[in-house]
Amino acid sequence: MKCLSRFEEQSMTIENAALLFVAPDIATRLTAVEAAAKSAQSAGDNAWMLVSAALVLMMTGPGLALFYGGLVRRKNVLSTMMHSFVMMAVVTVIWAIAGYSLVFAEGTPFIGGLKYLFLDGVGKDPNPDYAATIPQATFMIYQLMFAVITPALISGAYAERMKFSAMLMFTTLWTFVVYFPMAHMVWGKGGLLNAYLGGSIRTLDFAGGTVVHITSGVSALVCALYLGKRNGYPAEPIKPHSLVLSVVGACLLWVGWFGFNAGSALAASGLATSAFVATHFAAAAAALSWMLGEWLHSGKPSMLGGISGAVAGLVAITPASGFVKPMPALLIGLLAGLFCFWMVTAVKRMFGYDDTLDAFGVHGAGGTLGAILTGVFATNLINDAQIDGKTVPLGLVDGNPMQILNQGVGVLIAVGLAAAGTFLILKVCDAVVGMRVDRDEEEQGLDLSQHGEEGYILEA
Amino acid sequence: MKKIEAIVQPFKLEEVKEALKNIGIDGMTISEVRGHGRQKGHKEVYRGQEYNVDLLPKVKFELVVLESRLDEVLDTIATAARSGRIGDGKIFVFDVIEAIRIRNGDRGDAAV
Protein backbone atom coordinates (compact mmCIF):
# COMPACT_ATOMS: atom_id res chain seq x y z
CA MET A 1 0.00 0.00 0.00
CA LYS A 2 2.90 2.30 0.75
CA CYS A 3 3.80 2.98 -2.89
CA LEU A 4 0.27 3.73 -4.03
CA SER A 5 -0.61 7.34 -4.57
CA ARG A 6 -3.46 8.83 -2.61
CA PHE A 7 -5.62 8.79 -5.73
CA GLU A 8 -5.09 5.11 -6.23
CA GLU A 9 -5.88 4.44 -2.57
CA GLN A 10 -9.10 6.36 -2.92
CA SER A 11 -10.08 4.51 -6.03
CA MET A 12 -9.40 1.19 -4.32
CA THR A 13 -11.69 2.14 -1.45
CA ILE A 14 -14.36 3.07 -3.92
CA GLU A 15 -13.82 -0.17 -5.74
CA ASN A 16 -14.20 -2.12 -2.42
CA ALA A 17 -17.39 -0.28 -1.67
CA ALA A 18 -18.62 -1.07 -5.15
CA LEU A 19 -17.73 -4.70 -4.60
CA LEU A 20 -19.79 -4.71 -1.43
CA PHE A 21 -22.66 -3.22 -3.38
CA VAL A 22 -22.31 -5.71 -6.21
CA ALA A 23 -21.94 -8.66 -3.87
CA PRO A 24 -24.00 -8.01 -0.77
CA ASP A 25 -23.17 -11.46 0.64
CA ILE A 26 -19.49 -10.41 1.10
CA ALA A 27 -20.10 -9.70 4.78
CA THR A 28 -21.43 -13.20 5.27
CA ARG A 29 -18.47 -14.61 3.41
CA LEU A 30 -16.08 -12.52 5.50
CA THR A 31 -17.64 -13.91 8.66
CA ALA A 32 -17.26 -17.40 7.22
CA VAL A 33 -13.56 -16.77 6.46
CA GLU A 34 -13.00 -15.42 9.96
CA ALA A 35 -14.69 -18.45 11.45
CA ALA A 36 -12.58 -20.76 9.28
CA ALA A 37 -9.38 -19.00 10.35
CA LYS A 38 -10.42 -19.26 13.98
CA SER A 39 -11.23 -22.91 13.62
CA ALA A 40 -7.88 -23.55 11.89
CA GLN A 41 -6.02 -21.88 14.77
CA SER A 42 -8.07 -23.82 17.26
CA ALA A 43 -7.29 -27.07 15.43
CA GLY A 44 -3.56 -26.30 15.48
CA ASP A 45 -3.52 -25.26 19.12
CA ASN A 46 -5.71 -28.15 20.20
CA ALA A 47 -3.51 -30.69 18.43
CA TRP A 48 -0.41 -29.39 20.19
CA MET A 49 -2.13 -29.22 23.57
CA LEU A 50 -3.44 -32.79 23.35
CA VAL A 51 0.06 -33.99 22.44
CA SER A 52 1.48 -31.93 25.30
CA ALA A 53 -0.99 -33.46 27.75
CA ALA A 54 0.09 -36.92 26.64
CA LEU A 55 3.78 -35.92 26.92
CA VAL A 56 3.29 -34.71 30.49
CA LEU A 57 1.53 -37.95 31.43
CA MET A 58 4.48 -39.81 29.92
CA MET A 59 6.73 -38.00 32.39
CA THR A 60 5.03 -39.80 35.28
CA GLY A 61 4.60 -43.15 33.60
CA PRO A 62 6.91 -44.45 32.43
CA GLY A 63 9.37 -41.53 32.86
CA LEU A 64 9.45 -40.99 36.61
CA ALA A 65 8.52 -44.62 37.34
CA LEU A 66 11.65 -45.77 35.50
CA PHE A 67 13.88 -42.98 36.80
CA TYR A 68 12.95 -43.63 40.44
CA GLY A 69 12.48 -47.39 39.97
CA GLY A 70 16.06 -47.82 38.79
CA LEU A 71 17.47 -45.83 41.70
CA VAL A 72 16.09 -48.06 44.45
CA ARG A 73 17.15 -51.54 45.45
CA ARG A 74 15.81 -54.47 43.48
CA LYS A 75 13.42 -55.51 46.25
CA ASN A 76 11.62 -52.15 46.05
CA VAL A 77 11.44 -51.57 42.30
CA LEU A 78 7.73 -52.32 41.87
CA SER A 79 6.61 -50.43 44.97
CA THR A 80 8.55 -47.40 43.76
CA MET A 81 7.11 -47.61 40.26
CA MET A 82 3.71 -48.02 41.87
CA HIS A 83 4.15 -44.69 43.67
CA SER A 84 4.24 -42.98 40.28
CA PHE A 85 1.79 -45.21 38.48
CA VAL A 86 -0.97 -45.08 41.06
CA MET A 87 -0.96 -41.26 40.93
CA MET A 88 -2.08 -41.53 37.32
CA ALA A 89 -5.23 -43.20 38.62
CA VAL A 90 -5.85 -41.59 42.02
CA VAL A 91 -5.19 -37.95 41.13
CA THR A 92 -7.18 -38.30 37.91
CA VAL A 93 -10.30 -39.33 39.79
CA ILE A 94 -9.86 -36.56 42.38
CA TRP A 95 -9.27 -34.03 39.60
CA ALA A 96 -12.43 -35.01 37.75
CA ILE A 97 -14.58 -34.76 40.85
CA ALA A 98 -13.25 -31.64 42.54
CA GLY A 99 -9.61 -30.84 41.74
CA TYR A 100 -10.07 -28.91 38.52
CA SER A 101 -12.75 -26.74 40.07
CA LEU A 102 -10.74 -26.02 43.22
CA VAL A 103 -7.85 -24.81 41.08
CA PHE A 104 -9.45 -23.05 38.14
CA ALA A 105 -12.96 -21.94 39.13
CA GLU A 106 -13.08 -18.40 40.44
CA GLY A 107 -13.08 -18.34 44.20
CA THR A 108 -10.98 -16.70 46.87
CA PRO A 109 -7.32 -15.68 46.36
CA PHE A 110 -6.33 -18.94 48.07
CA ILE A 111 -8.57 -21.64 46.66
CA GLY A 112 -10.90 -21.95 43.68
CA GLY A 113 -14.66 -22.28 43.85
CA LEU A 114 -17.03 -25.13 43.12
CA LYS A 115 -18.38 -23.98 39.74
CA TYR A 116 -16.68 -26.83 37.86
CA LEU A 117 -17.41 -29.55 40.43
CA PHE A 118 -17.80 -32.88 38.58
CA LEU A 119 -16.47 -30.97 35.54
CA ASP A 120 -19.83 -29.28 35.16
CA GLY A 121 -19.67 -27.04 32.09
CA VAL A 122 -16.16 -28.14 31.12
CA GLY A 123 -16.51 -29.22 27.53
CA LYS A 124 -15.53 -28.25 24.01
CA ASP A 125 -16.08 -24.52 24.47
CA PRO A 126 -12.95 -22.59 25.40
CA ASN A 127 -12.51 -20.80 28.70
CA PRO A 128 -11.14 -17.47 27.45
CA ASP A 129 -9.66 -16.59 30.86
CA TYR A 130 -7.09 -19.33 30.44
CA ALA A 131 -6.90 -20.43 26.81
CA ALA A 132 -9.20 -18.87 24.26
CA THR A 133 -8.43 -21.16 21.34
CA ILE A 134 -8.75 -24.66 22.82
CA PRO A 135 -11.67 -26.52 24.35
CA GLN A 136 -11.77 -26.11 28.10
CA ALA A 137 -11.73 -29.92 28.35
CA THR A 138 -8.28 -29.88 26.68
CA PHE A 139 -7.06 -27.30 29.19
CA MET A 140 -8.55 -29.41 31.98
CA ILE A 141 -6.88 -32.66 30.92
CA TYR A 142 -3.56 -30.88 30.32
CA GLN A 143 -3.55 -29.32 33.79
CA LEU A 144 -4.50 -32.69 35.29
CA MET A 145 -1.18 -34.15 34.17
CA PHE A 146 0.66 -31.59 36.33
CA ALA A 147 -1.42 -32.58 39.34
CA VAL A 148 -0.51 -36.23 38.62
CA ILE A 149 3.24 -35.79 38.51
CA THR A 150 3.61 -33.43 41.48
CA PRO A 151 2.77 -35.90 44.28
CA ALA A 152 4.67 -38.59 42.35
CA LEU A 153 7.82 -36.47 42.65
CA ILE A 154 7.50 -36.52 46.45
CA SER A 155 7.72 -40.31 46.42
CA GLY A 156 11.45 -39.97 45.83
CA ALA A 157 11.83 -39.01 49.48
CA TYR A 158 9.78 -41.76 51.11
CA ALA A 159 10.63 -44.59 48.71
CA GLU A 160 11.65 -47.92 50.24
CA ARG A 161 9.87 -47.41 53.57
CA MET A 162 6.30 -46.02 53.38
CA LYS A 163 3.21 -48.19 53.68
CA PHE A 164 1.14 -48.30 50.51
CA SER A 165 -2.08 -47.51 52.38
CA ALA A 166 -0.43 -44.53 54.07
CA MET A 167 0.92 -43.37 50.72
CA LEU A 168 -2.57 -43.36 49.17
CA MET A 169 -4.07 -41.48 52.08
CA PHE A 170 -1.18 -39.02 52.22
CA THR A 171 -1.39 -38.27 48.50
CA THR A 172 -5.14 -37.77 48.49
CA LEU A 173 -5.00 -35.31 51.37
CA TRP A 174 -1.91 -33.63 49.95
CA THR A 175 -3.59 -32.70 46.68
CA PHE A 176 -6.35 -30.93 48.58
CA VAL A 177 -4.25 -29.27 51.25
CA VAL A 178 -1.16 -28.27 49.26
CA TYR A 179 -1.48 -28.67 45.49
CA PHE A 180 -4.94 -27.28 44.74
CA PRO A 181 -4.47 -24.12 46.83
CA MET A 182 -0.98 -23.50 45.46
CA ALA A 183 -2.00 -24.10 41.84
CA HIS A 184 -5.00 -21.79 42.32
CA MET A 185 -2.87 -19.05 43.84
CA VAL A 186 -0.46 -19.08 40.90
CA TRP A 187 -2.60 -20.02 37.92
CA GLY A 188 -6.25 -19.68 38.95
CA LYS A 189 -8.21 -16.56 38.04
CA GLY A 190 -8.01 -14.18 41.00
CA GLY A 191 -5.32 -16.27 42.68
CA LEU A 192 -3.12 -14.40 45.15
CA LEU A 193 0.08 -14.78 43.13
CA ASN A 194 -1.36 -14.76 39.60
CA ALA A 195 0.52 -12.15 37.60
CA TYR A 196 -1.94 -12.00 34.72
CA LEU A 197 -5.36 -12.71 36.20
CA GLY A 198 -5.75 -10.31 39.09
CA GLY A 199 -3.30 -11.50 41.72
CA SER A 200 -2.15 -8.99 44.32
CA ILE A 201 1.43 -10.34 44.51
CA ARG A 202 2.46 -10.90 40.92
CA THR A 203 4.78 -13.85 40.58
CA LEU A 204 5.99 -15.35 37.34
CA ASP A 205 5.75 -19.11 37.16
CA PHE A 206 5.38 -20.23 33.58
CA ALA A 207 5.10 -23.99 33.99
CA GLY A 208 5.10 -24.76 37.69
CA GLY A 209 8.36 -24.00 39.47
CA THR A 210 6.55 -23.08 42.67
CA VAL A 211 3.39 -25.08 42.10
CA VAL A 212 5.06 -28.34 41.12
CA HIS A 213 8.72 -28.38 42.11
CA ILE A 214 8.96 -26.30 45.27
CA THR A 215 5.82 -27.82 46.79
CA SER A 216 6.89 -31.37 45.97
CA GLY A 217 10.52 -30.79 46.93
CA VAL A 218 9.76 -29.22 50.29
CA SER A 219 7.06 -31.80 51.07
CA ALA A 220 9.65 -34.45 50.21
CA LEU A 221 12.06 -33.04 52.78
CA VAL A 222 9.34 -33.00 55.44
CA CYS A 223 8.49 -36.64 54.61
CA ALA A 224 12.16 -37.66 54.79
CA LEU A 225 12.59 -35.98 58.17
CA TYR A 226 9.30 -37.31 59.54
CA LEU A 227 9.80 -40.91 58.42
CA GLY A 228 13.44 -41.08 59.44
CA LYS A 229 16.21 -42.94 57.71
CA ARG A 230 15.91 -46.28 56.03
CA ASN A 231 17.29 -49.19 58.02
CA GLY A 232 21.00 -49.34 57.46
CA TYR A 233 21.34 -45.86 55.93
CA PRO A 234 24.02 -44.63 55.47
CA ALA A 235 26.25 -47.36 56.98
CA GLU A 236 25.22 -50.16 54.62
CA PRO A 237 25.70 -49.88 50.88
CA ILE A 238 22.32 -48.97 49.37
CA LYS A 239 22.98 -48.70 45.67
CA PRO A 240 20.71 -48.07 42.69
CA HIS A 241 19.76 -51.48 41.33
CA SER A 242 19.58 -50.46 37.68
CA LEU A 243 20.88 -47.17 36.38
CA VAL A 244 19.89 -48.42 32.94
CA LEU A 245 16.23 -48.01 33.89
CA SER A 246 17.03 -44.60 35.36
CA VAL A 247 18.70 -43.38 32.17
CA VAL A 248 15.71 -44.44 30.08
CA GLY A 249 13.38 -42.77 32.57
CA ALA A 250 15.36 -39.54 32.72
CA CYS A 251 15.46 -39.26 28.94
CA LEU A 252 11.71 -39.78 28.80
CA LEU A 253 11.38 -37.02 31.41
CA TRP A 254 13.50 -34.75 29.22
CA VAL A 255 11.27 -35.35 26.19
CA GLY A 256 8.08 -35.13 28.25
CA TRP A 257 9.24 -31.80 29.64
CA PHE A 258 8.69 -30.22 26.22
CA GLY A 259 4.99 -30.87 26.79
CA PHE A 260 5.30 -29.54 30.32
CA ASN A 261 7.01 -26.25 29.44
CA ALA A 262 6.30 -25.58 25.77
CA GLY A 263 2.74 -26.81 26.33
CA SER A 264 2.34 -24.19 29.04
CA ALA A 265 2.09 -21.60 26.25
CA LEU A 266 -1.39 -23.18 25.86
CA ALA A 267 -1.10 -22.72 22.09
CA ALA A 268 1.06 -23.88 19.18
CA SER A 269 2.67 -20.45 19.21
CA GLY A 270 6.04 -18.77 18.96
CA LEU A 271 6.04 -18.63 22.74
CA ALA A 272 5.76 -22.42 22.80
CA THR A 273 8.84 -22.65 20.58
CA SER A 274 10.69 -20.22 22.80
CA ALA A 275 9.86 -22.30 25.89
CA PHE A 276 10.85 -25.47 24.04
CA VAL A 277 14.26 -23.99 23.20
CA ALA A 278 14.87 -22.65 26.72
CA THR A 279 13.89 -26.01 28.21
CA HIS A 280 16.25 -27.97 26.04
CA PHE A 281 19.17 -25.59 26.54
CA ALA A 282 18.85 -25.59 30.31
CA ALA A 283 18.73 -29.39 30.46
CA ALA A 284 21.86 -29.69 28.33
CA ALA A 285 23.83 -27.10 30.30
CA ALA A 286 22.83 -28.63 33.64
CA ALA A 287 23.76 -32.16 32.56
CA LEU A 288 27.24 -30.87 31.71
CA SER A 289 27.71 -28.73 34.80
CA TRP A 290 26.64 -31.49 37.22
CA MET A 291 28.99 -33.95 35.51
CA LEU A 292 31.79 -31.41 35.57
CA GLY A 293 31.24 -30.73 39.28
CA GLU A 294 31.38 -34.45 39.92
CA TRP A 295 34.47 -34.88 37.80
CA LEU A 296 36.34 -32.23 39.75
CA HIS A 297 34.96 -33.38 43.09
CA SER A 298 35.25 -37.14 43.00
CA GLY A 299 37.40 -37.82 39.98
CA LYS A 300 34.85 -39.30 37.55
CA PRO A 301 31.87 -37.98 35.62
CA SER A 302 29.00 -40.46 36.05
CA MET A 303 25.93 -41.42 34.07
CA LEU A 304 23.81 -40.88 37.18
CA GLY A 305 25.36 -37.43 37.49
CA GLY A 306 24.49 -36.63 33.90
CA ILE A 307 20.82 -37.54 34.19
CA SER A 308 20.49 -35.95 37.63
CA GLY A 309 21.92 -32.76 36.18
CA ALA A 310 19.53 -32.83 33.22
CA VAL A 311 16.55 -33.19 35.55
CA ALA A 312 17.87 -30.37 37.78
CA GLY A 313 18.16 -28.10 34.75
CA LEU A 314 14.65 -29.00 33.60
CA VAL A 315 13.31 -28.23 37.07
CA ALA A 316 15.06 -24.86 37.27
CA ILE A 317 13.98 -23.70 33.81
CA THR A 318 10.34 -24.67 34.42
CA PRO A 319 9.18 -21.33 35.91
CA ALA A 320 11.41 -19.35 33.53
CA SER A 321 10.84 -21.27 30.31
CA GLY A 322 8.23 -18.94 28.82
CA PHE A 323 9.99 -15.74 29.87
CA VAL A 324 13.69 -16.02 29.09
CA LYS A 325 15.97 -15.87 26.08
CA PRO A 326 18.16 -18.83 25.09
CA MET A 327 21.42 -17.58 26.66
CA PRO A 328 19.92 -16.97 30.11
CA ALA A 329 18.37 -20.44 29.76
CA LEU A 330 21.85 -21.91 29.32
CA LEU A 331 23.03 -19.97 32.37
CA ILE A 332 20.08 -21.10 34.49
CA GLY A 333 20.84 -24.70 33.56
CA LEU A 334 24.53 -24.29 34.31
CA LEU A 335 23.83 -22.90 37.78
CA ALA A 336 21.11 -25.48 38.51
CA GLY A 337 23.44 -28.39 37.76
CA LEU A 338 26.11 -27.13 40.13
CA PHE A 339 23.68 -25.99 42.85
CA CYS A 340 21.71 -29.25 42.95
CA PHE A 341 24.92 -31.33 42.87
CA TRP A 342 26.06 -29.43 45.93
CA MET A 343 22.67 -29.89 47.59
CA VAL A 344 22.52 -33.68 47.19
CA THR A 345 26.13 -34.25 48.15
CA ALA A 346 27.45 -31.68 50.64
CA VAL A 347 24.21 -30.35 52.14
CA LYS A 348 22.48 -33.70 52.46
CA ARG A 349 25.52 -35.17 54.20
CA MET A 350 25.84 -32.16 56.48
CA PHE A 351 22.29 -32.51 57.80
CA GLY A 352 22.10 -36.28 57.56
CA TYR A 353 18.47 -36.61 56.36
CA ASP A 354 17.62 -39.59 54.18
CA ASP A 355 15.93 -38.10 51.11
CA THR A 356 16.07 -41.45 49.33
CA LEU A 357 16.13 -40.25 45.72
CA ASP A 358 16.91 -36.57 46.31
CA ALA A 359 13.46 -35.19 45.61
CA PHE A 360 14.29 -32.18 47.79
CA GLY A 361 17.85 -31.72 46.56
CA VAL A 362 16.73 -31.63 42.94
CA HIS A 363 13.13 -30.37 42.90
CA GLY A 364 13.06 -28.20 46.02
CA ALA A 365 16.46 -26.65 45.45
CA GLY A 366 16.26 -26.46 41.65
CA GLY A 367 12.72 -25.09 41.81
CA THR A 368 13.73 -22.34 44.21
CA LEU A 369 16.76 -21.36 42.16
CA GLY A 370 14.63 -21.30 39.02
CA ALA A 371 11.91 -19.19 40.64
CA ILE A 372 14.39 -16.54 41.76
CA LEU A 373 16.30 -16.51 38.45
CA THR A 374 12.98 -16.08 36.63
CA GLY A 375 12.73 -12.75 38.43
CA VAL A 376 16.15 -11.86 37.08
CA PHE A 377 15.90 -12.95 33.45
CA ALA A 378 12.19 -12.70 32.56
CA THR A 379 11.69 -10.32 29.67
CA ASN A 380 8.71 -9.03 27.73
CA LEU A 381 10.75 -9.46 24.55
CA ILE A 382 9.97 -13.16 24.95
CA ASN A 383 6.59 -13.01 26.65
CA ASP A 384 4.49 -9.99 25.72
CA ALA A 385 1.34 -11.15 27.47
CA GLN A 386 -0.35 -8.04 28.76
CA ILE A 387 -1.08 -7.19 32.37
CA ASP A 388 -4.08 -4.87 32.78
CA GLY A 389 -4.10 -4.21 29.05
CA LYS A 390 -0.49 -3.15 28.67
CA THR A 391 2.93 -4.69 28.21
CA VAL A 392 4.95 -4.25 31.38
CA PRO A 393 8.60 -4.87 32.27
CA LEU A 394 8.94 -8.37 33.71
CA GLY A 395 12.24 -9.15 35.41
CA LEU A 396 15.47 -7.42 36.42
CA VAL A 397 16.69 -7.42 32.81
CA ASP A 398 13.59 -5.40 31.86
CA GLY A 399 14.45 -2.92 34.62
CA ASN A 400 12.09 -4.36 37.23
CA PRO A 401 14.29 -5.57 40.12
CA MET A 402 11.24 -5.73 42.41
CA GLN A 403 10.14 -8.85 40.56
CA ILE A 404 12.86 -10.81 42.37
CA LEU A 405 11.17 -9.88 45.64
CA ASN A 406 7.80 -11.04 44.33
CA GLN A 407 9.38 -14.30 43.25
CA GLY A 408 10.80 -14.64 46.75
CA VAL A 409 7.36 -14.15 48.27
CA GLY A 410 5.99 -16.83 45.92
CA VAL A 411 8.75 -19.18 47.04
CA LEU A 412 8.09 -18.49 50.72
CA ILE A 413 4.37 -19.10 50.36
CA ALA A 414 5.02 -22.37 48.52
CA VAL A 415 7.58 -23.46 51.13
CA GLY A 416 5.35 -22.52 54.04
CA LEU A 417 2.23 -24.16 52.65
CA ALA A 418 4.08 -27.32 51.62
CA ALA A 419 5.94 -27.68 54.92
CA ALA A 420 2.99 -26.99 57.21
CA GLY A 421 0.47 -28.88 55.07
CA THR A 422 2.67 -31.93 54.68
CA PHE A 423 3.50 -32.11 58.38
CA LEU A 424 -0.16 -31.90 59.30
CA ILE A 425 -1.15 -34.61 56.83
CA LEU A 426 1.67 -36.89 57.97
CA LYS A 427 0.43 -36.54 61.57
CA VAL A 428 -3.11 -37.41 60.54
CA CYS A 429 -2.10 -40.39 58.37
CA ASP A 430 0.28 -41.65 61.03
CA ALA A 431 -2.51 -41.63 63.59
CA VAL A 432 -4.96 -43.38 61.26
CA VAL A 433 -2.91 -46.00 59.38
CA GLY A 434 0.74 -45.54 60.44
CA MET A 435 3.24 -44.19 57.92
CA ARG A 436 6.09 -46.61 57.95
CA VAL A 437 6.28 -50.34 57.28
CA ASP A 438 7.72 -52.38 60.15
CA ARG A 439 11.34 -53.37 60.20
CA ASP A 440 10.86 -56.90 58.88
CA GLU A 441 8.73 -55.69 55.99
CA GLU A 442 11.36 -53.12 55.11
CA GLU A 443 14.09 -55.75 55.13
CA GLN A 444 11.98 -58.05 52.98
CA GLY A 445 11.32 -55.24 50.55
CA LEU A 446 8.13 -53.34 49.79
CA ASP A 447 7.42 -55.30 46.61
CA LEU A 448 6.76 -58.47 48.59
CA SER A 449 5.49 -56.96 51.81
CA GLN A 450 3.12 -54.39 50.25
CA HIS A 451 2.21 -55.91 46.91
CA GLY A 452 3.00 -59.63 47.11
CA GLU A 453 5.10 -59.68 43.95
CA GLU A 454 8.65 -59.26 42.73
CA GLY A 455 10.10 -57.18 39.93
CA TYR A 456 12.57 -59.73 38.68
CA ILE A 457 11.79 -63.44 38.75
CA LEU A 458 14.86 -64.92 37.17
CA GLU A 459 13.88 -68.56 37.51
CA ALA A 460 10.48 -68.06 35.88
CA MET B 1 40.98 -88.67 41.37
CA LYS B 2 41.46 -85.01 42.15
CA LYS B 3 38.96 -82.22 42.33
CA ILE B 4 40.08 -78.88 40.95
CA GLU B 5 38.46 -75.63 42.02
CA ALA B 6 39.65 -72.74 39.95
CA ILE B 7 38.41 -69.24 40.72
CA VAL B 8 39.12 -66.98 37.76
CA GLN B 9 38.26 -63.61 36.27
CA PRO B 10 34.79 -63.65 34.68
CA PHE B 11 36.14 -62.46 31.34
CA LYS B 12 38.45 -65.49 31.25
CA LEU B 13 35.50 -67.91 31.29
CA GLU B 14 35.46 -68.68 27.58
CA GLU B 15 39.22 -68.88 27.24
CA VAL B 16 39.59 -71.39 30.07
CA LYS B 17 36.64 -73.46 28.84
CA GLU B 18 38.07 -73.56 25.34
CA ALA B 19 41.57 -74.50 26.57
CA LEU B 20 40.15 -77.38 28.62
CA LYS B 21 38.13 -78.60 25.67
CA ASN B 22 41.27 -78.57 23.52
CA ILE B 23 43.05 -81.01 25.85
CA GLY B 24 40.00 -83.26 25.94
CA ILE B 25 38.40 -82.28 29.23
CA ASP B 26 34.65 -82.30 28.68
CA GLY B 27 33.17 -82.29 32.16
CA MET B 28 33.04 -79.23 34.34
CA THR B 29 30.69 -77.20 36.51
CA ILE B 30 30.77 -73.43 36.43
CA SER B 31 29.24 -70.95 38.84
CA GLU B 32 29.26 -67.20 39.19
CA VAL B 33 30.69 -66.29 42.56
CA ARG B 34 31.92 -63.24 44.42
CA GLY B 35 35.06 -62.86 46.43
CA HIS B 36 38.45 -61.33 46.78
CA GLY B 37 41.95 -62.26 47.78
CA ARG B 38 44.57 -59.58 47.80
CA GLN B 39 42.68 -57.52 45.28
CA LYS B 40 41.23 -54.54 47.11
CA GLY B 41 38.09 -53.98 45.09
CA HIS B 42 37.01 -50.57 43.89
CA LYS B 43 35.16 -47.42 44.85
CA GLU B 44 31.73 -46.51 43.50
CA VAL B 45 30.13 -43.10 43.93
CA TYR B 46 26.38 -42.51 43.60
CA ARG B 47 25.40 -38.85 44.01
CA GLY B 48 28.35 -38.25 46.29
CA GLN B 49 27.73 -41.35 48.40
CA GLU B 50 30.83 -43.53 48.27
CA TYR B 51 30.78 -47.30 48.45
CA ASN B 52 33.78 -49.62 48.56
CA VAL B 53 33.00 -52.73 46.63
CA ASP B 54 35.41 -55.43 47.74
CA LEU B 55 33.55 -58.61 46.81
CA LEU B 56 34.13 -58.80 43.11
CA PRO B 57 32.48 -61.09 40.59
CA LYS B 58 34.48 -64.20 39.69
CA VAL B 59 33.78 -67.46 37.90
CA LYS B 60 34.43 -70.75 39.66
CA PHE B 61 35.31 -73.90 37.69
CA GLU B 62 34.82 -77.23 39.40
CA LEU B 63 36.09 -80.38 37.74
CA VAL B 64 37.29 -83.81 38.77
CA VAL B 65 40.21 -85.33 36.80
CA LEU B 66 42.32 -88.47 36.89
CA GLU B 67 45.52 -88.05 38.85
CA SER B 68 47.57 -88.79 35.73
CA ARG B 69 46.19 -85.72 34.01
CA LEU B 70 46.26 -83.35 36.97
CA ASP B 71 49.39 -81.34 36.17
CA GLU B 72 48.47 -80.93 32.53
CA VAL B 73 44.98 -79.62 33.46
CA LEU B 74 46.33 -77.27 36.13
CA ASP B 75 48.84 -75.80 33.68
CA THR B 76 46.16 -75.38 31.06
CA ILE B 77 43.83 -73.52 33.43
CA ALA B 78 46.57 -71.35 34.87
CA THR B 79 47.88 -70.36 31.45
CA ALA B 80 44.45 -69.62 30.02
CA ALA B 81 43.26 -67.66 33.05
CA ARG B 82 46.37 -65.56 33.48
CA SER B 83 46.27 -61.86 32.65
CA GLY B 84 49.22 -61.08 34.90
CA ARG B 85 47.33 -58.66 37.12
CA ILE B 86 46.16 -58.88 40.72
CA GLY B 87 42.74 -60.53 40.79
CA ASP B 88 43.47 -63.35 38.35
CA GLY B 89 42.29 -65.84 40.97
CA LYS B 90 43.44 -69.10 42.55
CA ILE B 91 43.34 -72.85 41.93
CA PHE B 92 42.76 -75.37 44.69
CA VAL B 93 43.17 -79.16 44.43
CA PHE B 94 41.39 -81.72 46.66
CA ASP B 95 41.49 -85.49 47.02
CA VAL B 96 38.32 -87.19 45.87
CA ILE B 97 37.22 -90.31 47.76
CA GLU B 98 34.58 -91.58 45.38
CA ALA B 99 32.74 -90.72 42.19
CA ILE B 100 29.49 -92.21 40.92
CA ARG B 101 27.87 -91.80 37.51
CA ILE B 102 24.21 -91.55 38.37
CA ARG B 103 22.95 -92.90 35.03
CA ASN B 104 24.54 -96.36 35.25
CA GLY B 105 26.18 -96.63 38.65
CA ASP B 106 29.81 -96.56 37.34
CA ARG B 107 32.20 -95.92 40.18
CA GLY B 108 35.73 -94.58 40.64
CA ASP B 109 37.89 -93.66 37.64
CA ALA B 110 35.25 -94.97 35.23
CA ALA B 111 32.81 -92.35 36.48
CA VAL B 112 35.16 -89.41 35.88
Image (tube, rainbow, N blue to C red):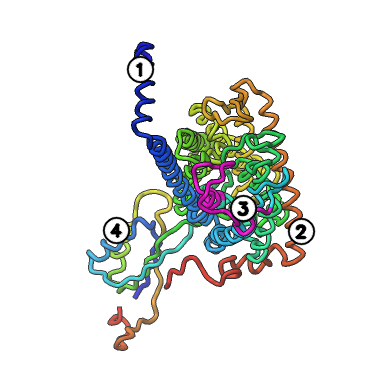
Element carrying mark 2 = helix
Q: For residue A164, which quarter of the picture?
A: bottom right
Between disc 3 and disc 2, the foreground one is: 3
Visible residue check, residue B38: no
Q: Using the numbered discs, state the Cα–Cα distance from disc 1 to disc 2 in whole angstroms.
A: 80 Å
Element carrying mark 3 = helix
Name the image quarter holding the C terminus of chain A: bottom left
Looking at the image, is mark 1 or mark 3 earlier in the sequence? 1
Q: Chain of mark 2?
A: A
Q: Which residues are magenta?
A: A114-143
Q: Using the numbered discs, state the Cα–Cα distance from disc 4 to disc 1 in whole angstroms.
A: 94 Å
Location of mark 2 (residue): A427
Residue A98 falls within the magenta-colored stretch: no
Which amino acid type corresponds to the residue marked 3 in the rendered image? Tyr
Location of mark 3 (residue): A100
Visible residue check, residue A21: yes
Percent of width and height locating residue A307: 49, 44
Location of mark 1 (residue): A11
- Farthest-out residue, front: A21
Residue A10 in the figure: left or right of residue A152: left
